[in-house]
Image (cartoon, helix red, strand yellow):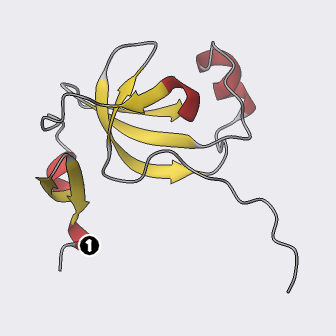
Amino acid sequence: MGKVTNITQVKFSVGELVHHRLFDYRGVVVDVDQNFQGTDEWYEAVAKSRPPKNKPWYHVLVHESDHSTYVAEQNLEADVVSEPINHPMVEHIFSRLDHGKYVRIDLDN
């Protein structure tokens, strides 16, 4: 059996509710990158806390807004509110909130 490398454990999965530790907003994860996939220019301009690029990053729909954000895992924690996220894209990606986690439309069969 060959040696397996580059395995990254992620803390959150698609549909999980999260809270941003620094900026105090709630959201729902819509995609996960095992490591930073943005540009160096974006990282220098936006990622002021300089989170590690070699750890998971998450695409998050922000509650009470119409935008999404790209967040390093170290800046997220599980959301304890567990109430629905108010974002216009939620209904296009998820079918329902089930026990504190959203179910993707394509998995709801």
* Residue 63 in the figure: left or right of residue 47: left
Q: In this view, does 54 lie above or below 46?
A: below
* Residue 81 in the figure: left or right of residue 29: left
Give the quarter of the image for residue 19.
top left
- Residue at x 87%, y 81% (from the top left corner): 2
Q: Mark 1: which amino acid?
A: Asp
* Residue 100 in the figure: left or right of residue 36: left
- Residue at x 19%, y 28% (from the top left corner): 81
Q: Is residue 6 above or below residue 76?
A: below
How many callouts does the rendering have?
1
In this view, the residue in front, 80 or 27, is 80
In this view, the residue in front, 70 or 67, is 70
Residue placed furthest toward the right: 2
Give the quarter of the image for residue 93.
bottom left
Tell me the quarter of the image containing the C terminus: bottom left
**SS state under label 1:** helix
Q: Residues within 10 Å of mark 1 (few under 14, many from 20)?
A: few
Q: Is residue 101 above or below residue 79?
A: below
Give the quarter of the image for residue 23.
top left
Q: Is residue 50 above or below residue 56?
A: above
- Residue at x 14%, y 34% (from the top left corner): 86
Whole-percent x, y for residue 88 in the image: 16, 41
Tell me the quarter of the image containing the N terminus: bottom right
* Residue 22 in the figure: left or right of residue 106: right
In this view, the residue in front, 64 or 29, is 29
Whole-percent x, y for residue 26 in the image: 28, 26
Whole-percent x, y for residue 54 in the image: 74, 41
- Residue at x 60%, y 43% (from the top left corner): 56
Residue on which the image places disc 1: 106
